[in-house]
Image (cartoon, grey):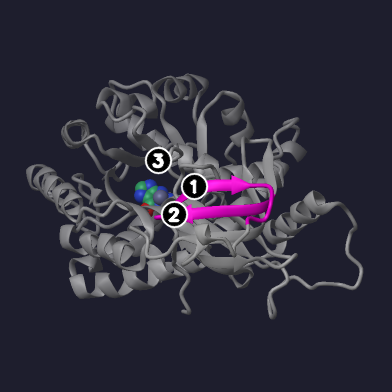
Amino acid sequence: MSEQNLVFLGSFASAKSLKELTVNFGSIIVEDGKITKITNQLVDVQSDRYSGYKIVRLTDDQVLIPGFVDCHTHAPQFPNLGLGLDRPLLEWLEKYTFPLEKRYSDVEFAAKVYDVVVKRLLNNGTTTACYFGSLHLEGTLELAKSAIKHGQRALVGKVSMNLKNDAGYYNDTKKELAEVERFVEAVLEYKNDLVQPILTPRFAVSCDDELMSGLADISDKYECRIQSHISENHSEIEYVLKINPDCESYAHVYDKNRILNNRCIMAHAIHLTDNELQTMVHKGVAIAHCPASNTRLCSGLCPVRKYLDSHLVVGLGTDVSGGDSATILDAMRRTMDVSAHLEMKGNKGFAISWIEAFYLATLGGAKALKLDHKIGSFEVGKEFDALLIDPYAVDGPIDKHAYSVSGNAEEHVINLLQKFIYVGDDRNIAQVYVKGEKAKYLL
Ligand SMILES: Nc1nc2[nH]cnc2c(=O)[nH]1
Ligand SMILES: [Zn+2]
């Protein structure tokens, strides 16, 4: 239960669909963390109805938007953020990533890193994160505890791997399946309605059929979400097909093991064949588009427009530390950039607009995580995950000039949001709310 009921007075913007923004000037009432009323007028905050409510009056230049949803990031890789991006995926994993992730057998180290990660993401406006942890049960529980402590909405996954690698970073299958079940039960026992477990077979390079189908059984038993990586890099795809000679495609490997369903979210999905795309759409699988890491690891250019046109559900992921930025603002910009590059290379209509990027960062991400009944837009009955945006924050990157583009009130809000999306950073996020609770930290 939220400590305080809230009345927001001012301008609000949220995505209604891929192409449509809803812009209001008026009031949002938040009670026990849920939106109970949205009006196009300023409610009378002097009335008894709102006595005891916290009143938040936005300035003419501020705007309230839904919180960002990061559909894919690796919490244990944050110490490597901005490092070691000189190798393609499989070499990068062996050289930089597995050695770092192995360190999370040290629970104290895990707790320290995860505390910083969760606070950093909240400060960047990520009110919901879908996390990969590491192979370690206790270490990854520290990630769930950090999210609970700091009030972030999160799906937290203990990574599963049972195939050998040079770093010796994998588990025996029986031990792994038992640990995953203990992990799921431990997170459920926290009884925190913001934080849920998600099953996390790393990818088909590091998981065999026995492990994947065992995880599918656990997913069915607990009705929990499942996440992995698919078709990120050509060498990865080649290797997966080599070790699964009975399968005609990467998606077939997962499908054979009952991983693909409407509780599943797959990262990257850059090089899907048309058949794989159809399978994913048909099974209700969502994807996390991770443009920063797709570029940094030279994995490829993901045809997001083609996927959206095929009715694939798409959210955005930062994919740290393959991605070199921990903010969804950056993921939005890179989504626009990569899609513009595809358009410039002759793919007509492929460019993603800023309004579409905003949708993917909020409601699209919520749909991808099957949380859109709770979050992603401002609607009565949804929980209040929101960012108070202050585009002209003192010391921020956006200057307020004597001349500003004229327009009516709605155009003014659209301009503020557009400037924030193209130019802003965390200095322009004056406050962060998760289920009606403040969650902005001074780092
Ligand atoms: N980008 C990325 N791809 C992966 N595929 C398997 N593991 C990983 C990872 O940690 N990062
Ligand atoms: Zn990843």
Magenta-colored stretch includes residue 39: yes
* Residue 95 is at least partly visible in this image: no
* Residue 264 is at least partly visible in this image: yes
Residue 57 in picture, x, y percent from top left: 64, 67
Left or right: where does residue 289 sit relative to residue 259? right
The Cα atoms of the two marked residues, 1 and 3, are separated by: 48 Å
Residue in front for this viewpoint, 229 or 429: 429
> Mark 2 touching mark 1, by CB under 8 A?
yes
User: Mark 3: which amino acid?
Assistant: Glu
Depicted 188 relative to depicted 64: above or below: above
User: Mark 1: which amino acid?
Assistant: Thr
Residue 423 in picture, x, y percent from top left: 71, 63
Q: Which residue range is magenta in the image?
A: 25-43
- Circle 1: element type: strand
- Circle 2: element type: strand
Q: Which residue does the image show at 46% across and 57% down from the upper left? A: 127
Left or right: where does residue 98 sit relative to residue 325? left
- Circle 3: element type: helix
The Cα atoms of the two marked residues, 2 and 1, are separated by: 6 Å
> Mark 1 touching mark 3, by CB under 8 A?
no
- In primary-sequence order, the first of circles 2 and 1 is 2
Q: Which residue is mark 3?
A: 236
Q: Which residue is mark 1?
A: 36
Magenta: predominant secondary structure element? strand
Q: Which residue does the image show at 24% across and 40% down from the upper left? A: 207
Whether the residue under disc 3 has CB within 8 Å of ligand 1: yes
**Local crowd at mark 1 within 10 Å, few (<14), some, or many (≥20)?**
some
Residue in front for this viewpoint, 274 or 129: 129
Q: Which residue is mark 2?
A: 31
Residue 283 in picture, x, y percent from top left: 39, 22
